[in-house]
Every structure is written in structure tokens, then in C-alpha cells.
Image (spheres, rainbow, N blue to C red):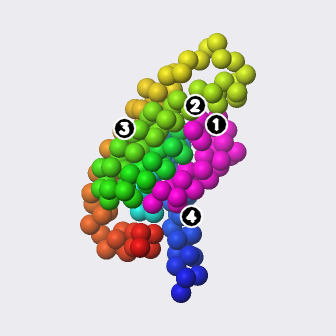
């Protein structure tokens, strides 16, 4: 029985990774990835912090390798996904996942991007600490609001609740 549950969890995680990878570049505004925030919040509420974190890491790596996106794909996604999941796990409220995503991506992710981009570009005189914050914050807010509206409907469905039961026992 446990192996059947694990296969279901990995299948759902794989579908979330595929959705994130396909949708993020389609609805991307330069420097902002609101669809990544939509999927981070949805994954956090659906699967919890650890699976949301895995999804964000895998998607970031895929985006960097296959789409040529700089390391901002990594710093922009992992903090928000994990904090959204942690906030949801703690309070079991969809809006808390939204707060976790906005703070994780908009603040922590943007600040973590500065040293990463200094290393990546080899220059620091053209960058300053908050250079990424407005775009990351804008993408996180818009994507999180969309996710919240999506979750209002999804949370009422039997299928969504059944999937949540697999991850939150």
C-alpha cells in the first residue's frame, strides 16, 4: 500500500513540475514569473513545503539548463515555495501560503539574488541589493493572488481534497 501512495505522490509532483515548467515561460514578463508563484502556492497547499521545494528546485534547474534562464530562476522560486508550504502547514489557511510566497520570493528570493548574480556576472558595481525586489515582489504578488483565486475553487473539489490527504496525514 505504501508503494502505491508513493507512486501517486511522485506522479502528482511530476505533473506539478511539468505545469510549472510549461506555464512559467508562457506567461512571463521580463524579470517576473507570476505563473511560478501561482504554482508555488498551489503546490504548497496541495503537497506541503518539502514537495513544493522539490518542485521549485527541479523547475529552476530545468529552466536554467533548457531555457537559458540565469540563476534567478533558482533564487526566485525556492524560498517562496518552501515558505508558502511552511505557512500553509502551520496555519492550514490558503492566504497564509500566499503570505509565505510573497515574503519568500519577493523579499528573501530577491535579496538572495544579488550575491548570486554578482557571482554569475562577475561584476558588482552595476547591481545593488534591492535591484531585483520590485520585479520579484510584483511577480509574487500577482501570481499569489491568482493562486488564491484558483485555490478558492480547487479547495472545494473532492479530487483536490483527496490529493491533499495523500500529503497531509
Label 2 or label 3, whichever comes before in sequence order: 2
Instruction: Give the SS element for disc 4.
Output: helix
Q: Which label is found at residue 103?
A: none
Nearest to the observer: residue 10 or residue 109: 109
Q: Secondary structure at mark 2?
A: helix
- Tell me the distance, in whole angstroms, between the alpha carbons under discs 3 and 4: 25 Å
Q: Earlier in the sequence, mark 4 or mark 2?
A: 4
Q: Which residues are magenta?
A: 48-75
Give me the C-alpha separation between circle 4 and circle 1.
22 Å
Mark 2, mark 3: which one is toward the viewer?
Answer: 2
Say if 17 sits above or below 69 in the image. Answer: below
- Give the spatial CA distance, label 2 vs label 3: 18 Å
- Looking at the image, is 109 positioned above or below residue 148? above
To which quarter of the image does residue 72 belong? Answer: top right
Q: Quickly name the residue at label 1.
A: 71
Characterize the magenta stretch by its predominant secondary structure: helix
Q: Where residue 13 appears, x then y in whole percent?
A: 53, 64
Amino acid at each position: 500500500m505504501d508503494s502505491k501512495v508513493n507512486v501517486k505522490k511522485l506522479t502528482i509532483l511530476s505533473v506539478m513540475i511539468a505545469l510549472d515548467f510549461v506555464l512559467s515561460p508562457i506567461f512571463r514578463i521580463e524579470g517576473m514569473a507570476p505563473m511560478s508563484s501561482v504554482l508555488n502556492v498551489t503546490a504548497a497547499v496541495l503537497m506541503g513545503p518539502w514537495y513544493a521545494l522539490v518542485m521549485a528546485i527541479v523547475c529552476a534547474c530545468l529552466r536554467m539548463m533548457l531555457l537559458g534562464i540565469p540563476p534567478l530562476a533558482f533564487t526566485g522560486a525556492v524560498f517562496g515555495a518552501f515558505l508558502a508550504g511552511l505557512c500553509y502547514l502551520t496555519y492550514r489557511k490558503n492566504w497564509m501560503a500566499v503570505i509565505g510566497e510573497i515574503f519568500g520570493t519577493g523579499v528573501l528570493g530577491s535579496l538572495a539574488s544579488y550575491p548570486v548574480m554578482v557571482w554569475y556576472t562577475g561584476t558588482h558595481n552595476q547591481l545593488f541589493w534591492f535591484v531585483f525586489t520590485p520585479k520579484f515582489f510584483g511577480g509574487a504578488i500577482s501570481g499569489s493572488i491568482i493562486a488564491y483565486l484558483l485555490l478558492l475553487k480547487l479547495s472545494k473539489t473532492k479530487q483536490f481534497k483527496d490529493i491533499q490527504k495523500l500529503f497531509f496525514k
